[in-house]
Amino acid sequence: MMYDYLIVGAGLFGATFAYRASRQGKRCLVIDKRPHLGGNVYCEQVEGINVHKYGAHIFHTSNQEVWQFVNHIVPFNRYTNSPVANYQGRLYNLPFNMNTFYQMWGVITPDEAQRMIEAQKQEAQHQLNGGEPSNLEEQALTLVGRDIYEKLIKGYTEKQWGRPCKELPAFIIKRLPVRMVFDNNYFNDSYQGIPIGGYNKLIDGLLEGVETRTNTDFFADRNYWEGVAEKIVFTGKIDEFFDYRFGQLEYRTVNFEQQTLDTPNYQGNAVVNYTEAQVPYTRIIEHKHFEMFGQQVYDVPRTVISREYSMEWKPGMEPYYPINDERNNQLAEQYRQLAHDCPNVIFGGRLAEYRYYDMAPIVEKVLKMKIE
Ligand code: FAD
């Protein structure tokens, strides 16, 4: 055997695993079918701006060990996610906080805001007549009331899922936190930011000194690849690994429409959500704001934006979000059972586990793994 580990997939899971294993003296080879390393965190440089090719990625965690680990690979900047919602041309701060309530109702104090929300929640509960919410719409109405639901949740959620909120299960929205303070910081985590110089620096740092091959699909020559290493770390699709024996797992996907504009500052923020149903895209991302602040924004004369269209996944498209419904959960479980019987294969990451993970939990998972 030429290697101790063949790592299939150069995303964050594969790259972090390769980093740890190679530092323990293991011989590793990382292959990826894409023409670049980094998986979904990969960025492409356009006009001196790091463009998040597979969707905006903001690293956030409360785990100090994870934060220190990634920062020792590359220091992170102070980017704070504070998205804005555009509903019919009016802007509202997110997540729902005192700024949002002031914009929505003109209320100045937390007491006034609380009274508005409570009155609307009670109205929704009254309509349920003592029953439990039976769909996402009823659930959201009982959690935050009609105004917030109709302006900031309904259209966006329907675009995301491609179905009316009345047809979506209530459990999708368990909680809708409202903040009675003027705080637009989206995450509650202790740490957040973007690697200075972009995510490719993080991936390059993790894979420094590790042998890698891009444009290399494991399934194009499976027999060969299965013979090169003692163990395989597989981060591709678990159903593909087992030849779709029980059927295909489904995903939601996103189509990105990228545009370079002749202005230094298009929307003044990295993330603007479009929350009305009539606008076909869910968000516009302006990439430079992840890494350029203040005057830096104007030092680069052009800007790059991406409109995001949420859509149903079909074979051949990028698989992004696992679908948390009965059919797919059951199918994934059947594949996980098969995975148990493969002692020399480690299935890791969002495709191989068929679970949505943010980046920090992926890193945390790999840091906790015993590598033998
Ligand atoms: P991936 O990054 O998908 O890597 C898997 C790799 O395996 C890919 O490069 C693929 O090409 C390769 N591969 C697959 N099959 C084969 C094969 N047969 N042969 C060779 N190679 C193969 N997380 C956050 O913390 N913050 C965010 O803001 C955030 N935003 C996101 C936005 C979107 C649109 C999406 C989809 C995810 C987002 N995430 C975010 C989650 C984040 O992308 C994941 O946590 C992370 O990318 C998971 O890494 P991974 O290695 O498991 O998967």
Image (cartoon, grey):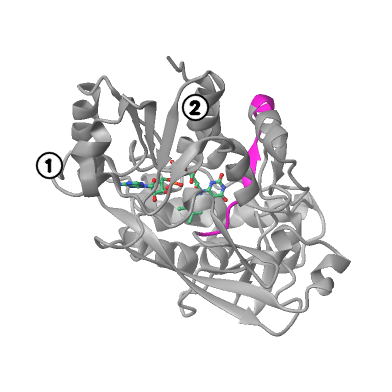
Give the amino acid type for the residue marked by disc 1 in the picture: Phe
Q: Disc 2 to disc 1, how far (Cα)?
A: 28 Å
Residue matched to label 2: 365
Q: Magenta part of the protein: which range?
A: 55-65
Split into 4 quadrants, where in the image is the C terminus?
A: top left
Q: Secondary structure at mark 1?
A: loop
Q: Is residue 347 left or right of residue 267?
A: left
Residue 253 x, y percent position in the rendering: 38, 60
Q: Amino acid at mark 2?
A: Lys
Q: Disc number at residue 246?
A: 1
Give the crowd class for mark 2: few <14, some 14-19, many >=20 residues within 10 Å: some
Question: Residue 93: image x %, image y %?
Answer: 70, 62
Closer to the camera in the image, 87 or 357: 357
Element carrying mark 2: helix
Say few, some or many: other residues with alpha carbon within 10 Å of mark 1 (under 14 / 14 to 19 / 20 or more).
few
Which residue appears farthest toward the bottom when viewing the image? 262
Name the side, left or right, on which 58 lies relative to 102: left
Looking at the image, is 231 positioned above or below residue 147? above
Q: Residue at x 18, y 28 (%)?
A: 338
Q: Which quadrant does the N terminus fall into? A: top left
Going by the picture, which residue comes out furthest to the front?
A: 2
